[in-house]
Image (spheres, rainbow, N blue to C red):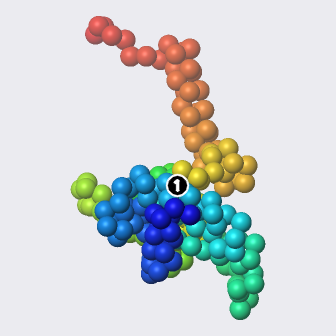
Amino acid sequence: MEELDRAVEAALFAAEEPMTAEALAGFLGGAAVGDVRNALRSVADHYEKRGVHLVERGKRWHFETAPDLAHLLRREKEQVRRLSRAATEVLAIIAYHEPVSRAEIESIRGVQTSGGTLDVLMEAGWVKIAGRREVPGRPTIYATTTEFLEHFGLSSRRDLPGIAELRATGLLDPVEDAYDELVGESDANQQGDNADGNCDPIGED
């Protein structure tokens, strides 16, 4: 391994928290960020078939146990907690539209969202308060967390599944059906008005 690769490896091994390429460059005495990124990819390739992997989550890098070996390190049986349909929908909306306010979430879902639903997602560590929208009332806005990316094995939000994949799971059906129905009714009403000549006359008393 090159000297910078070894330095990056050592820094991440000793780091208490995941680090960005920029933070690593500063920690290593002002190394070029581009060189650090190349070193990160080189180290990641080096560990690809080993017991630990170097992975990127939300632009931050850290070592983690290889997925196929994780079961060897578990000492307690994990309890599976399934999200409710409402919580799953809210989480998907936040992930794809963040930062987003509660009112915006309700507008997309077409129903009111319980404060408890957001509390569950924040307690799980997947959603966080990201500030306030600079509009009248300054509503709280929400975004996903690095823990959300880690849990679902995503490097960034760009790795989220496409709309077609989500629709195949049935997650978007209620929202999509409601939207399609609304658009269909609007188009039908407009065509009916045009056909019946129900337009306000212009220039007539």
The residue depicted at 62 percent of the width and 59 percent of the height is 45
Q: Looking at the image, which residue is at 36% across and 55% down?
A: 32
Q: Residue furthest bottom?
A: 75
Residue 161 position within the rendered picture, expressed as x and y whole percent measured from the top left: 63, 51
- What residue is drawn where x is 42% and y is 64%? 20
Say if 181 sits above or below 197 in the image.
below
Residue at the top extreme of this rendering: 203
Residue 20 in sight = yes
- Pick the front one: 33 or 180: 33
Which residue is the site of mark 1?
157
Using the image as rendered, state which of residue 187 and residue 90 is in the foreground: 90
Percent x, y of residue 155: 55, 59
Q: Nearer the viewer, residue 155 or 35?
A: 35
Instruction: Give the quadrant of the C terminus.
Output: top left
Query: Which amino acid does the dot numbered 1 rest on?
Result: Arg
Q: Quadrant of the N terminus?
A: bottom right
SS at badge 1: helix
Residue occupying the point 56% across, 39% down: 182
Residue 111 seen by the camera: no
**Residue 104 sits in which quadrant?**
bottom left
The location of residue 8, given as percent across then percent down, is 47, 68
Q: Nearer the viewer, residue 147 or 140?
A: 147
**Residue 74 on image: x %, y %:** 71, 87
Q: Quadrant of residue 31?
A: bottom left
